Structures are given as C-alpha cells and as structure tokens.
Amino acid sequence: MTAPANAGPGTAPGAAGPAAAVPAAGGVQAEGEVPLAVDLDGTLVRSDLLLESLFEFVRGNPAGLFKLPAWLARGRAVLKQRLARLAPPDAHTLPYNAELLDYLRQEKSRGRRLVLATAADRAVAEAVAQELGLFDTVLASDGVTNLDGPAKRERLVAEYGEGGFDYAGHGGADLPVWAAARKAVLADAAPGFAKRVARRTPVERVLGQPAAWRDYLLALRPHQWIKNLLVFLPLIAAHALYQPAPLARALLAFAAFSLCAASVYLFNDLLDLQADRRHPHKRSRALASGRIGIRPCCALLAVLLAMAFGLAAWIDPWFLAVLALYYALTASYSLGLKDFVVLDVLLLAAGYAARVAAGAVAAGIALSAWLLAFCVFLFYSLALIKRFAELVLLRPIDGAHTHSRGYLLDDAGVIAAQGIASGYLAVLVLALYTNTATVHGSGGRYWLFWVNCLLLLYWVSYLWLMTDRGRVQDDPILFALKDRVSRALLAAMALVALAAA
C-alpha cells in the first residue's frame, strides 16, 4: 500500500528528514479535526518491536550479541536504528490489536488525521504505516533522538499544541504524553491503570484486554513437562521406584527439569517469533499472537532459570552439571543449530537422553549402557518424526517448494527411512537386553519383556504411519498423549513392565 496522497512531509515511508510531520493549522480545532496520535509497541502492535529485532538478530548472529553494548553506549536511538536495519520485524505478520485497528479505520473514514507516534525506529514505523495505509504522519526515533516518553510529548505538543491531540497508548511510559493530550485511548489496559490515566486525562475508550495469567502458563507448555518423567526411567529399570530416598530425589529432579524446560520454551519462542507467525499452527502461540508481552516473558524466563539451577545445586553438584549441559544443548539448538540438518535431531534426541542421565545421577543409580542405547535410538526416531511431520504439514501449503529447518520435501523419504530404522533399533536393543543374564537373573517374569518388544514395535510403526497421514502435527509425545491407540499401547507397556518386575 502507499501512503495517502494528502500526506505531508515525513508522511510516506522513505521521506526525507527525521520524524518530520505536518504542523496543525492555527486556531481552535473542531472535534473531527483533532488528530489522534497512536503509539506502536504494546498499543497498535501487541509486542515490543525493539526486543523482537534484538532476538531475531541474536538468533541469526549470536556473536553479534557482543556488539550491543557498544551500540547502546551511543544511545538507545542508535541501538534501535542498527537493529532495525539488521533484523527488521515483518510488518505483514505482526500481531496487531484488532479492536484498535477497527477503531482507527472508523476514525479514518470520518476524515480524522491519524499520527503514528512511536519510540520505535523510523524504518520500522514506516514499514507498519505502509502495511496498514492508515496514517497521515509518522513520528519516530531517527538514530539521534529516542522518541520515548517526555521526548514524544514535547514533539506532539510542538506539532499540535497542548491539548491539541488525542493519544492512544498502553503503559506507564505513555503517562507524560497523556498529560498533554486532550483525551486518552487505552489499549489492553487493566482497570486500575485506566483509572490512573483518567486522573490526568479523560479516557475516551479502552480497547482490548490485558494478558491473562492462563496465557503465561500456556507459554510455559506444561503439557510438555511430561517428557521430564524420563528422570524416573533409571529408577524403574533398577527396580528402585519404591525406595523413598531415590524417589524423593527423582521428584526434585523432575521439578528442576520442568522449571528449566519452561524457561527453554520461552527462550525458543522469543527467538522464533517471526518464524512462528508464518506457521499455520505455531502462530497461535501466546507470544507469537501477542496475547502476552515480551518484557514480562523475559523476566519470567530469568526467574524460572534461577529457580531451576538453585534447586539443581541443592540436589547434587553432578545433577547441576547435567542440567547445565541440557540447557547448553537446548540453548544452542534455539540459537541456530536447529537449522543444521541431522545435527538438529541429534540435539533433540540428546535432550531426551539428558533427562534419563539426570534421573540416574539424582537418584544415585548407575546408568545402564543398555538403557542409554535404547533411549538414543528411540528418541532419535521421535525427533525425526517431528521434522517429518513439519514437512507433511506444510506440503499442502507450499507444494514442491516445501521446506522446514533446512529440510526439503525431497528429503522426506530419507527422513522416514532413518527414523523408522532408528525406532526398530530401539526395539532390537530391548530384545537383546531381554535375553541377557542380567534380566534372567533378576527373577520375576522376565519373559514378559518380549511382550513389550512387540508392543514397542507396533507403536513405532503406528507413529510413523500416522505421521505420514498428517495426523502428527508437531510433537510425537503430544500426539501420543491425545491419541487413544498410543495411550493404550503405552499403558499396556507400563503394566507389562510392572508385571515382569
């Protein structure tokens, strides 16, 4: 879209001069002539575009993180300008505030002048203005002036006079601007904050609603924490599940891994914001859709990580080392290693195996080589299912050009062959272990382990068949929890293992 034909200097994207604007005409303005200035971050867009650019920049260039202090030392405006050039947000996929957009379109149809007034860099602001085609004027940071808070107030007062404009914002940084505005429009504001603004400026309307605690909880993906039950696997294999001390330590290990994994999921979502918004299902995630804010998520991530490592240090120094290794692997995966074919699935499989090793360390149980080999092959198969499922899901959308994480549609056959073979190798390891002197000498009905070999063979084959049919949309573990056949097979394997012991 192009800017309106009646736009003045600084209106159209690419216009000369930093944050130029068209001065208001002299005299008293009529109701319909009062311009409406609109904030960008957290108001028009349910996100923080500076932090989006920051995470996108770090994801593509982790070493560039060391450049940030030098840019920031020259001022926030310089930092914003550099990040806007190197990692600009995609204006087309941003999570816009739908209620506010509808209101702006109504005001625009009445002939009202709309001003995009933001502390974001001008390049970002102009991209949004061009995408929406609603704004007559763009006021933004320009690499020299950071148009935030008091600076934005001064600029708007200079352009339109004290009380000569209305202002739409969302947070405490907008209070100085509202103090100089005629009326206030609030976006996603809590009732208490709306009353605070009303004490300064009449509130015309409140659009949208603040984030709910449930959205933050969903962003932690508690349904994924079931993977951390793998810390109990060494206890089950060693028949120590009912011993109080090892069980208590394993429970603490489960809690530590769940806290750490939750922080990893937040970190991954922050790095993948733009990619998730282009995905048919991931775009509905709390962060990608803008239902929760980036700044609160960063604070929550730090708290979760501190709690996880504090608990790990209390459990055992070696458990802390395993948890640190797990976090290093997953962070490296999120920072770009997931774009390296084969290596990405090896890292995913290593994450599963790390949970098993951590459970053994926490409970003080020697890790069996048989158990480790079984986990590596099975989890490698599950990780390949995740990649294969993404290709199958995107195939109807992108056709022959389908690609995901470095994998092409033409790779699907190879991925399936490797994944099925790896799953069957896990069955073979279990079968060989069943025939060892260790199992034969442990007493019990050891022959029942052969039943589990058959059940596992069935489950691996079933998972891959469902994936090829498009039934597995992303994570095979989540599919198994929702799928009736998978739940029945897993429950049967658990009962057989208990009976064998």
Image: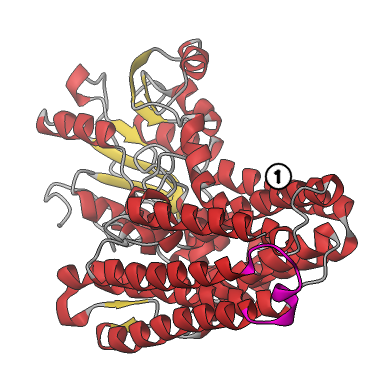
**Residue at image coords 44%, 15%:** 201
Inspect this view and state whether residue 401 appears: yes
Q: Residues within 10 Å of mark 1 (few under 14, many from 20)?
A: few
Percent of width and height locating residue 441: 76, 73
Q: Label 1 sits on what residue type? A: Val
Percent of width and height locating residue 185: 35, 23
Q: Name the residue nearer the viewer: 123 or 411.
A: 411
Q: Is residue 435 above or below residue 83?
A: below
Q: Name the residue nearer the viewer: 434 or 280.
A: 434
Q: Quadrant of residue 31?
A: top left
Badge 1 marks a residue whose secondary structure is helix
**Residue at image coords 21%, 29%:** 103
Percent of width and height locating residue 435: 63, 81
**Residue at image coords 82%, 70%:** 366
Question: Which colouring convention does the figure follow?
Answer: secondary structure
**Residue at image coords 11%, 28%:** 110
114 left or right, relative to 67: left
Residue bounds of the magenta highlight: 435-446
Inspect this view and state whether residue 77 appears: no
Percent of width and height locating residue 87: 45, 68
Tell me the residue that label 1 is attached to.
Answer: 303
Q: Quadrant of the C terminus?
A: bottom right
Is residue 440 rendered magenta in the image?
yes
Is residue 139 rendered magenta in the image?
no
Q: Name the residue nearer the viewer: 179 or 66.
A: 66
Q: Quadrant of residue 291?
A: top left
